[in-house]
Image: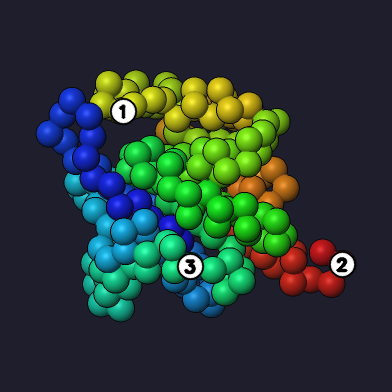
């Protein structure tokens, strides 16, 4: 799992970072299915957490589980710098959201190359909410990569409704569409929505994080099945 290292937003004192539930929901989905999860980030160490994601109304069961899980908290506090991660050592990669990826993972060359390495090796890549901003770096590394790709991501409508559209350098849905991606979203904002396009699995918002993780596990299990 690749987490953002970025906490600052524009024109506001509000902070951002990892949206906690978008990390914890998939993390425990993977752990409970017997997968080993390695955590990484551009800078390494402890990623920032979006304070809004720790408010009572956004707390999930997996958040509470994380707060009581010393091993998970230790892993979170000691993420591996992304330039030390090698595709050959892993079966898949998952990018949680929070607004942070808009700034760092979208322009991180190591992350963009890692995504392309996984896909070129026939391994699935998953991202949720603002995590798909990481695909922009892959597009920079390989122009045309996103053209015709069917993806989901935090929508412009959702961005407006949460009131943060003025605190970002661009809107993610618009940026992905400008790169040629076909962005699919739920008919109603904030409902879960997942898109699978070959090895690329993306989800729209926090409620999509768990479903994206399950879709990724399905993709991995199909790879392990002879003829799958």
Q: Quadrant of residue 93?
A: bottom right
Q: Are marks 2 and 1 in contact (CB under 8 Å)?
A: no
Does the image show residue 99? yes
Which residue is at a point 65% across and 38% down the rendered structure image?
145
The residue that mark 1 highlights is 168
* Secondary structure found at label 3: loop
Q: Which comes sooner in the sequence, label 3 or label 2?
A: 3
The residue that mark 3 highlights is 85
Query: From the viewer's perspective, is the residue at label 1 or at label 3 nearer?
Result: 3
Q: CA distance from mark 2 to mark 1?
A: 45 Å
In front here: 139 or 135?
139
In front here: 9 or 19?
9
Mark 2 burial class by Cα count in 10 Å: few <14, some 14-19, many 20+: few
Which residue is at a point 62% across and 30% down the rendered structure image?
181
Q: Are marks 1 and 3 in contact (CB under 8 Å)?
A: no
Placement of the C terminus among the 4 image quadrants = bottom right
Q: Which comes sooner in the sequence, label 1 or label 3?
A: 3
Q: Looking at this rendering, what residue extends furthest in the left direction?
A: 13
The residue that mark 2 highlights is 227
Q: Quadrant of residue 178?
A: top right
Q: Is residue 214 above or below residue 176?
A: below
Percent coordinates x, y for residue 214 in the rendering: 57, 58
Q: Which mark is residue 194?
A: none
- Looking at the image, residue 211 sits to the left or right of residue 49; the answer is right
Mark 1 burial class by Cα count in 10 Å: few <14, some 14-19, many 20+: some
Q: Is residue 124 above or below residue 7?
A: below
- Looking at the image, residue 41 sits to the left or right of residue 48; the answer is right
Q: Quadrant of residue 77?
A: bottom left
Q: CA distance from mark 1 to mark 3?
A: 28 Å
Q: CA distance from mark 3 to mark 2?
A: 29 Å
* Secondary structure found at label 1: loop
- Looking at the image, residue 155 sits to the left or right of residue 143; the answer is left
């Amino acid at each position: 799992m690749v987490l953002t290292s970025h906490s600052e937003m524009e024109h506001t004192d509000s902070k951002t970072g990892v949206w906690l539930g978008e990390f914890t929901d998939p993390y425990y989905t993977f752990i409970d299915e017997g997968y080993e999860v390695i955590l990484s980030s551009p800078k390494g160490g402890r990623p920032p957490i979006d304070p809004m994601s720790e408010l009572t109304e956004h707390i999930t069961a997996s958040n509470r589980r994380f707060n009581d899980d010393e091993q998970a908290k230790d892993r979170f506090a000691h993420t591996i710098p992304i330039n030390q991660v090698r595709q050959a050592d892993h079966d898949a990669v998952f990018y949680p959201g929070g607004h942070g990826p808009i700034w760092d993972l979208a322009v991180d060359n190591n992350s963009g190359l890692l995504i392309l390495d996984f896909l070129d090796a026939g391994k699935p890549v998953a991202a949720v909410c603002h995590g798909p901003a990481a695909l922009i770096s892959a597009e920079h590394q390989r122009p045309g990569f996103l053209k015709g790709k069917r993806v989901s991501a935090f929508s412009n409508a959702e961005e407006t409704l949460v009131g943060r559209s003025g605190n970002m350098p661009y809107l993610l849905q618009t940026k992905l569409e400008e790169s040629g991606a076909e962005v699919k979203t739920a008919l109603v904002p904030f409902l879960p929505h997942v898109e699978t396009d070959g090895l690329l699995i993306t989800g729209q918002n926090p409620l999509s994080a768990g479903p994206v993780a399950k879709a990724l596990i399905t993709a991995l299990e199909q790879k392990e099945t002879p003829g799958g």
